[in-house]
Amino acid sequence: MLDLRYVREHRGTVERAIRDKNVDLDLDRLLRLDDEARAALGGIDELRRERNELSARFKDAPPAEKPALGQRAKALGAEAGRADAALAELEGELRGFQLRLPNIPWEGAPVGPDEGANVVVRLEGTPREFPFTPRDHVELVEMNGWAELGRITKVSGARTYCLKGRLALLEQALMFWAQSRLMHHGFTPITVPALAKPEAFVGTGHFPGHEEEAYEVPKDGLYLAGTAEIALTGLHGGEILDEAQLPILYAGFSPCFRREAGSAGRDVRGLLRVHQFLKLEQYVICRDDPAESATWHARLLANAEELLRLLDIPYQVIETSTGDMGLGKFRMNDLESWVPSLGKYRETHSCSTLHDWQARRANLRWRDGERRVRHVHTLNNTALATPRLLVPLLENHQTADGRVRLPEAIRPLMGGDEFL
RNA sequence: GGAGAGGUGGCUGAGUGGUCGAAAGCACCGCACUCGAAAUGCGGCGUGCCCGCAAGGGCACCGUGGGUUCGAAUCCCACCCUCUCCGCCA
């Protein structure tokens, strides 16, 4: 969400963001609604002021004047009430527009309508040359009894899975390992609910717009979140944080649910794109200083890269284009891990800076040295998501006989064994 | 699921339907005292929006939404949430 005053005063910048982010939004209409709403508000305030004035006189007024005074005050109040109802309608419409206002992307973002405009900024690690034909992760998992991929659809439908045996253990080991490392980087491990109220989804910017991506629990008015970001943004929502509390660094762990509506037929095989998964998310709330949030952006990315490096997974860093980064993002970098069976890099991580766009929606603020109240900046980045990351992990480290060599970093948590 | 209690500013906690955006204390900020600190004293100290260059002015908000009234934190209704006890459960 953008400040309407900002929109009024930086119309050109907002127009460009709308265009670059490929957003369908009538800015003229928005500004017109804003004008009307402010004009209406002025009138209502004036009516109420008069009403309040009459009411204040009522008590000490001569008894003879009271009926007339009361009547006039009541009439003013009723008029204000009617005007207010009309204003509420205006504001409802205005808010609908306001919620779809995109954040202003940073000047370094490639401009383009979709992921085709994304830029590879760095390659890290070298994809392994296999002296044999590498198997894909589904084969590896099946020949080792590490999952139930077919059977479980009887129970839970497509895009669901069971991890079994040592792979089930590895998932937990990876999560524990990543959480520990982040803790040493100063992040507070925190587990959060996947269940959340729709307001929380509005707070992050997932609603309105991406309702189709979330599972709904209508009986209780709740939705299942596809990321810990939802709960973590809401966690401090409405608060005014003290400067001393900042930055807040969370390593949020949660089950994640995604309906994958619109990706029917894509990645249906295996563990790459599933409806339910586990994710450890780095999350930062900091002061609204662009230099500071830029520093955190770099650190989040570095932390995620460190984990990938320690797991010996080759990856590339993507600078996401304006059209692909999403409405609320200021900047977004994806990490894509090498998947041998596909012969390409696939997204396993996403690092985003939202500036105060989310903070405005979630009403998340801090008080600065001059005791002024300001919105915070928020950032989030995948630290580790499974089972998606298991795909490159298994495939990159497979041996000719179908075993998987564990990266050294994770061996201590897997009984010191070299192989899974 | 059953029974009860309660939701007021960062916290604790007052608040006869009118001068209450809200006492008091704590916390916090400024100043004084001090070599410095503590203690003490004085002053300040909610949020949002609108108008204004500013000074300042106005409106709204005491869980949420309705209602009664000239006037609601205070009365009425509904809902939400929290806490305690019982039941059930991981």
Image (cartoon, coloured by chain):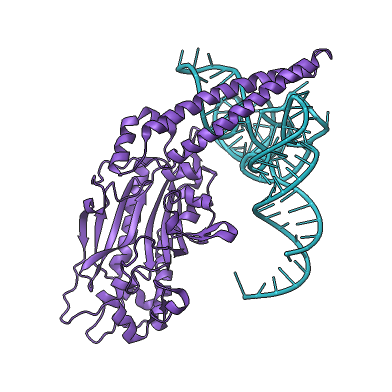
Please name the residue shown 41% across and 82% down the image.
A151
Left or right of residue B19: residue B54: left
Q: Is residue A288 above or below residue A86?
A: below
Quadrant of the image occupied by residue A8: top left
| Location of the C terminus of chain A (image quadrant) | bottom left
Q: Quadrant of residue A61?
A: top right
Q: Position of residue A91 (x, y in %)?
A: 51, 34
Q: Is residue A56 visible?
A: no
Q: Residue at x 32, y 67 (%)?
A: A265
Q: Nearer the viewer, residue A384 or A257?
A: A257
Chain in cyan, by letter, is B
**A116 up-or-down from A64: above or below:** below
Q: Is residue A248 left or right of residue A77?
A: left
Along the line of sight, which residue is nearer the eye, A60 or A368? A60
Q: What tint does the image give chain A?
A: purple
Front position in the image: A279 or B3: B3
Q: Is residue B46 left or right of residue A270?
A: right
